[in-house]
Image (cartoon, rainbow, N blue to C red):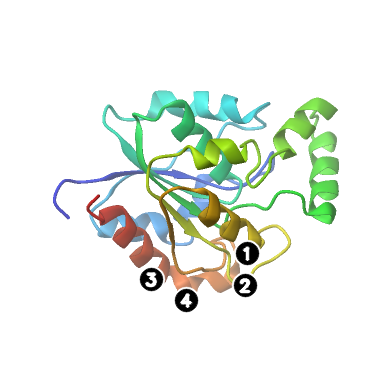
Amino acid sequence: MGNVTTLLLVHGGLWDDMNAERFWHEPGIVAGLEERGFTLLAPDRLPRARSWLAEVEHLVPLLPPGPVCVVAGSNGCSVAVRLALTCPDRVDRLVLAWPATVGEPVVDVRTRRELTELGASPRIAKDLLSGEVLRGVTEGELTGMKLPVGVLPSTPENPVHRRRTSVALCSLLPHPSELPGTPEPVRRDFRPYLGSFLTSVTSFVSEVP
């Protein structure tokens, strides 16, 4: 693979007990990517962050001097896009895997209730759940992104990760690549798809611009 590429893995979850260990390590993703020659950063996201920007501010000090490729899952996709928008010189490529869907009524009601029970104010809950295609991101910001972005849908889709979200991302981003879908890594049915996921990420990250 020539020069060693550094991957920043941004796990899913939103104010819950999800962490990098459960999302990336236990399913075998970290070990698989390391075997393929990547240098990995897989930090835990900021617990109960009050905004998506606060999550970016938590990650920036962890970044190496050179640019990284960010691989994000579920609600971590909002963090990854906000990081790329805030620090465009630090991110040269994105993989948005299993992006969380905005505006799914039953899911939003449940998530808002869970956020409130965990201590989020109504304003914080609203800000975290608001968005057009991705939470915390406008369509205008997506259409202005110049870097290559791989979009990997959840297969099969579910109310939290609808296929329409991936379709919308591919229609708005200037340089999208749709990657073969898989279940989310925290699902028991992900394991047979591990090899496919690793191959998709490796191929996309290794593409010559």
Looking at the rendered structure, the kind of residue marked 1 is Arg
Name the residue rendered at 22%, 53% in the picture.
Answer: 208
**Image quadrant in which you'd find residue 150:** bottom left
- Quarter of the rendering containing residue 48: top right
* Residue 83, horizontal then vertical, whole percent: 48, 32
Residue assigned mark 2: 156
Instruction: Describe the element under mark 2 as helix, strand or loop.
Output: loop
- The residue carrying pointer 1 sits among few (fewer than 14), some (14 to 19) or many (20 or more) residues within 10 Å by Cα, namely many
Of labels 2 and 4, the one closer to you:
2
How far apart are labels 4 and 1 at the CA level?
Answer: 20 Å
Distance of label 2 from label 3 (alpha carbons):
17 Å
Q: Residue furthest bottom?
A: 192
| Quarter of the figure with residue 91 | top left
Mark 2 → mark 4, Cα distance in angstroms: 14 Å
Q: Residue at x 57, y 58 (%)?
A: 166
Residue drawn at point x = 62 percent, y = 72 percent: 156
* Amino acid carrying mark 3 in the image: Gly
Labels 3 & 1 near each other (Cβ < 8 A): no
Q: Earlier in the sequence, mark 2 or mark 3?
A: 2
Q: Earlier in the sequence, mark 2 or mark 4?
A: 2
- From the viewer's perspective, tell me whether residue 164 is left or right of residue 5: right
Query: Callout 4: helix, strand or loop?
Result: helix
Q: Which of 67 and 187 lies nearest the eye of the viewer?
A: 67
Residue named by callout 3? 195
Residue 180 in sight in this render: yes
* 79, 26: nearer the viewer: 79
- For numbered disc 3, what is the local secondary structure? helix
| Quarter of the N terminus within the rendering | bottom left
Q: On residue 163, which mark appears?
A: 1
